[in-house]
Image: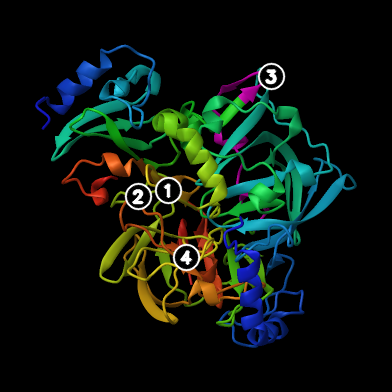
Amino acid sequence: MVTFAITGAQARAARLGFCAVLCLAVMSCGGGDGGGASGGSSSGGGTTTGSNVVSVVVDAGPLPTTNAATNTLFTTVTVCVPGSTTNCQTIDHIQVDTGSYGLRILSSVLTLALPVQTASNGEAIVECTQFVDGYSWGPVALADMQISGESASSIPIQVIGDPNYATVPSDCSSIGPAEDTVAQFGANGIIGIGPFAQDCGPNCAAAVIPATYYTCTASACQGTELAQTFQVTNPITFFATDNNGVIIQLPSVAASGAATVTGSMTFGIDTQTNNKSGSQTVLTLAGSAGGSAGQLPGELTTNFNGGILNESFLDTGSNGLYFNSSLTTCVESGLTDFYCPSSTENLTATLEGQNGMSTSVAFSVAPADTLAAADAAFSNLAGPYPDAQDTQTFDWGLPFFYGRTVFTAIESAATAVGTGPYVAF
Amino acid sequence: MIDLKLSALASAMLIAGFAPGIAYATLGEPEASVQADVAQLNGSIQVTDRSGYRLHEIQLSSGTLVREFVGPDAKVFAIAWKGPTIPNLRQTLGSYFDNYVTAAKANHLGHTRLQIQQSDLVVQAGGHMRAFSGRAYLPQAVPSGVSVGDLH
């Protein structure tokens, strides 16, 4: 995800121009590996600890020199061959994504031989995972997974880019470019912990959907229906008790950016003393069947600048705030899909759930060409949303999560304040 | 402009009776390319006349709605989609697909945004797992009087 590619000269200029603030930002955000808030400016209420809490970090990613990441949230997971406590591997720079569902690991970083899930005819189950910008192809394997003190046994995960399954079906590659390497993917893997359980869900169980699941022999693949039990699934749903959702807590980020941001991801909502719902506003999301105003699963409404954006979403996997407005875009090569107002714009919007509850959100848009290229985290990076629905969407990416504690409850899962799918903050 | 005045139902029946095999229309190609094998799609198709263009709507089995826009010259000038899956873009973009892939790699904006702005091809797509939307159109082929804002 080289979403913030700046040419060498521009990067150097940006670093020079912002060295002073950059260094301050590094000092205020650096250090601390236990999920701390920086500079006491977080509204998240300080450090959360416990056996259901794992550290998350925003940094330059797994390839900092060649593919530096921007506003990308990572964590570390351990996977084991099912049933083994020794045949295990701990993998860092797994992207934390509330916009997808399931654990996926790039084959090139995986040293374990995980068993591939097979269909009743004995053939391997292989998945074509769709992203807006391309596809990831690879088998569905079974693994035991540990993250913090949580564990899940023999869960279906995807191994992306497995050379044993090198032939990509035509209808899968018809999505767009392949994203089967760490450089293409932007992470060593991804842990999809959004508000749904399966990556496809009932659609793929009921019919053969092109460019989703396949059964493959050594030489050929064909599309298949796949029961939800066998689909790649949000790993949280397998945890013994903390299985109804997740809380992501990140500190605020200085306006000038930060090289590193460390926060926490807490599993479960209202299942332990450290994950209780408070006075957060609960905004329910469109469910698997969609919303009442044509929304797709997971969407809510944003009221912004006089418009009603019914197809909005919160997504740690988006690295900016993306929405259409009259703000000018940057002219510099590599930045033309970001905003460059003449000075920082301070704006507000109102988020509204399917349940009619709403809350106001303030945010800032800085000129993207003034942000230090050496940094990885920016609270004020924004750009236009490629809105094919014409101003129906506000994509609240990772900047939204800075300085907040955001609850995400999984569809049909109950908490003390409601039933998912919802977000609360 | 478009002199065929068929009800959506009649159009669907007419098109379903055409030769099977092509699931989608193709960008820049004649309207005949929209002849769909509805059975193969496991979906349904509707055709309606709009001001300045004719709209073909194909409901895919995944739940995704594909819209194909045909101009007065009887050629497809735009494709739009919305739903849980991305449609087959090799088929819908036709001769523009390779260009699309090359441009998507060159302007990599992450897993949730895609923007290609060329003189002869515009592709805009966004979303995330289970929720995708996008469109591709030929800016020079958009009929006069048709707003790009209507192409969704």
Image marks 1 and 2: residues in contact by CB distance under 8 Å = yes
Q: Regarding mark 3 in the picture, which secondary structure is present there?
A: loop
Q: Amino acid at mark 2?
A: Ala
| Residue range of the region highlighted in magenta in the rendering | A215-241
Which marked residue is nearer to the observer: mark 2 or mark 4?
A: 4
* Disc 2 chain ID: A
Marks 3 and 2, how far apart in space? Answer: 38 Å
Marks 1 and 2, how far apart in space? Answer: 6 Å
Which residue position holds label 3?
A217
Residue at 66% x, 53% y is: A186
Q: Residues within 10 Å of mark 3 (few under 14, many from 20)?
A: few
Q: Amino acid at mark 1?
A: Ala
Which residue position holds label 4?
A338
Q: Amino acid at mark 3?
A: Thr
Marks 4 and 1, how far apart in space? Answer: 16 Å
Asked if A140 appears above or below B132 in the picture, the reply is above
**Are labels 3 and 1 assigned to the same chain?**
no
Q: Regarding mark 2 in the picture, which secondary structure is present there?
A: loop
* Disc 1 chain ID: B
x, y (%) of residue A390?
30, 54
Q: Can residue A375 be seen in this snapshot?
A: no
Marks 3 and 1, how far apart in space? Answer: 33 Å
x, y (%) of residue A325?
34, 67
Which residue position holds label 2?
A388
Image marks 3 and 1: residues in contact by CB distance under 8 Å = no
**Are labels 3 and 2 assigned to the same chain?**
yes
Which marked residue is nearer to the observer: mark 3 or mark 2?
A: 2
Q: Is residue B128 magenta?
A: no
Of residues A267 and B135, the one nearer the viewer is: B135
Which residue position holds label 1?
B125
